[in-house]
Amino acid sequence: MIDRLERARQSGRKIWALLFVLLALFCVIFFAARGRFQATASTSTVGTILAPFEMASSFVGQQIQSISANLWEIATVHEQNKMLKNEVEQLRQQNTTAAEYAAENERLRELLSYKQGAHQFDLLAARVIGRDTALWTSMIVIDRGAKDGVRENMPVVTGKGLVGHVTEVDPVSSKVQLILDARSSVGTLVQRAESRVTGILTGTMDNPYMPQMINIPRNADVEDGDAVVTSGFGGIYPKGIAVGRVASQHSDDSGLLKVAVIETAVDFQRLEDVAIITASREAPPEPIQPQPLSPGAEAAAQISAAQTKAAAP
């Protein structure tokens, strides 16, 4: 019973509040046209009473409008930010691709320049497609094979110098033994006109990227910084291909010869594009002429030859 009375009272209060609001709205509408009616004391009273409500309503409307504008601006900024991120990512990818193309063009331009200068060679461009992890400084795999006319023992170079030679040929790929390999053997000579000292270039396990030029006489005219090129001896590498420069020298274990440590012309850690010498029109190196004998030595040699001929059956 008490709950019913309480609900009835609350309903009555709501009804009176609604009637009051309707009455206030009626008064506002009735006295809105100032040009037709003269403001009365009752009108001023009603306006005074309703002023706080109007101010509150206006403030709430402004806040709602401001919040709506802010929400729209936030949504717009979020969408723009998402679009900008996508554009930045696309530009980053394009920049990476452009840098890669620029580096490749630089390497190919270097090979083209070498090809234009080395008229005695027929060159076939190739790309490094693999390395054996166990033989990182010894072997590479290139994307040219028997279908491209590649054969074993063909020299491999870059625009800067000697790389190695082909050891295995498959239909579409080949393996190249680098001059850094300890099993490699390249006939070399010091290019300086006053020296022309010859030796053999071979790799070493102690310093994989710095091969050694061995079999150099202890008193030979070799200086640090001398350019080293292929000598042409050995039947694989043509003469005159750049190998590197002398970085340092030391005596070998016997003490009778010395060893020159070579800084290679090719950066093998950044090797990506190479060229295969498929043909060489260079004349083979002249054979080493024996020193002329003195008259006594020449007579002894003739007597020895005659005795050998007489003893022969």
Image: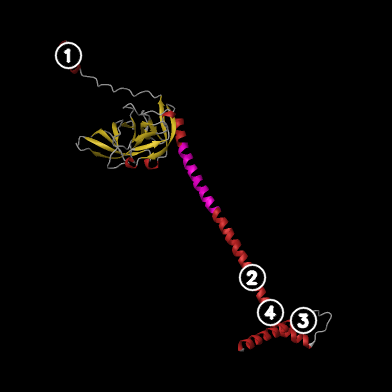
Sequence-wise, which precedes: disc 1 or disc 2? 2
In front of the other: label 3 or label 4? 3
Q: Do the residues bearing badges 3 and 4 touch, measured as CB atoms within 8 Å?
A: no
Residue 102, horizontal then vertical, whole percent? 49, 42
Tag 1, which secondary structure? Answer: helix
Sequence-wise, which precedes: disc 4 or disc 1? 4
Distance between mark 3 and mark 2 Cα atoms: 30 Å
Amino acid type for the residue under numbered disc 4: Met
Tag 4, which secondary structure? Answer: helix
In front of the other: label 3 or label 2? 3
Amino acid type for the residue under numbered disc 1: Thr
Distance between mark 1 and mark 2 Cα atoms: 119 Å
Tag 2, which secondary structure? Answer: helix
Question: Which residue appears at 68% of the width and 86% of the height?
Answer: 12
Q: Which residue is mark 1?
A: 308
Q: Which residue is mark 2?
A: 66
Sequence-wise, which precedes: disc 1 or disc 3? 3
Q: Nearer the viewer, residue 200 or 248?
A: 200
Label 2 CA crowd tier, 10 Å (few <14, some 14–19, many 20+): few
Check residue 89 for magenta coloring. yes
